[in-house]
Image: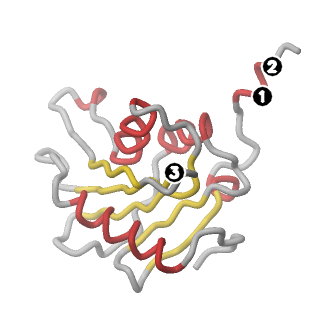
């Protein structure tokens, strides 16, 4: 595992990874063949899943991480604890699929950088855990725009 203060139980991490792997199966990725699933844990304990959805006009493709977060936000959830991500070209993920820069910045809008966990997984036994701060150091966030 990565260097982080784990604030999510091992059982919850396993549940998140299992959900991310399940969501990966729903991926719509006919162009890259790289399917990604994500599972987002809210502060209230709810889990929202997402998968990547590609488009022939590549710029409108949306990543699994942003799908999961958008689903949660559209349901009135704005406080998050952790996100698991599983992705790859093979049937079983053979790489750690890290969130892209756009997804990291999207997370930054809603998540505390020092306590929000990002779990990248190949399986429930093979995963790494990072804080958002580790993946997006010295980031620009909402507080930078606070004029008060």
In space, the residues marked 1 and 3 are separated at their CA atoms by: 21 Å
**Which structural element holds mark 2?**
loop
Question: What numbered label is drawn on residue 146?
Answer: 2
Q: Residue furthest top?
A: 147
Disc 2: CA contacts within 10 A as few (<14), some (14-19) or many (>=20) = few
Locate residue 50, reporting x and y percent: 31, 48
Foreground tag (3 vs 2): 3
Of labels 1 and 3, the one closer to you: 3
Residue 20 in the image: state x and y as whole percent. Answer: 32, 62
Crowd rating for badge 1 (residues with CA inside 10 Å; few <14, some 14–19, many 20+): few
Q: Residue at x 52, y 74 (%)?
A: 128
Residue extending furthest toward the bottom: 125
Name which of mark 1 and mark 3 comes first in the sequence: 3
Residue identifier under label 1: 143
Q: Residue at x 17, y 48 (%)?
A: 29
Say above or below: 47 vs 124. above
Can you say whether 89 is above or below 59 in the image? below
State the separation of the CA atoms marked 1 and 2. Answer: 5 Å
Residue 61, position in %: x, y?
27, 34
Q: Which of the labelled discs sits on residue 42, or is there none?
A: 3
- Which residue of the protein is positioned furthest toward the front in this rendering? 44
Q: Which secondary structure, mark 3? A: strand
| Residue 147 falls in image quadrant | top right
Q: Nearer the viewer, residue 20 or 105?
A: 20
Sort mark 3 into few (<14), some (14-19) or many (20+) by Cα contacts within 10 Å. Answer: some
Give percent across and percent down for residue 42. 51, 51
Label 1: state its secondary structure: helix
Residue 11 horizontal side relative to residue 144, left or right: left
Determine whether, in the image, residue 91 is placed left or right of residue 61.
left
Task: Assess whether mark 2 and mark 1 are in contact (beta carbons under 8 angstroms).
Answer: yes
């Amino acid at each position: 595992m990565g260097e982080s203060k784990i604030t999510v139980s091992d059982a919850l991490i396993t549940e998140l990874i299992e959900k991310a792997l399940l969501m990966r199966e729903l991926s719509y990725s006919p162009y890259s063949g790289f399917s990604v699933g994500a599972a987002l844990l809210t502060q209230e304990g709810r889990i929202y899943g997402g998968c990547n959805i590609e488009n022939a006009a590549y710029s409108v493709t949306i990543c699994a991480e942003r799908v999961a977060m958008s689903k949660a936000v559209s349901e009135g959830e704005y406080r998050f604890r952790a996100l698991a991500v599983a992705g790859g070209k093979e049937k079983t993920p053979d790489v750690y699929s890290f969130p892209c820069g756009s997804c990291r910045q999207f997370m930054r809008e809603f998540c505390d950088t020092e306590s929000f966990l990002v779990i990248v997984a190949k399986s429930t036994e093979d995963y790494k855990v990072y804080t958002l701060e580790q993946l997006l150091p010295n980031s620009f966030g909402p507080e930078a725009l606070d004029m008060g």
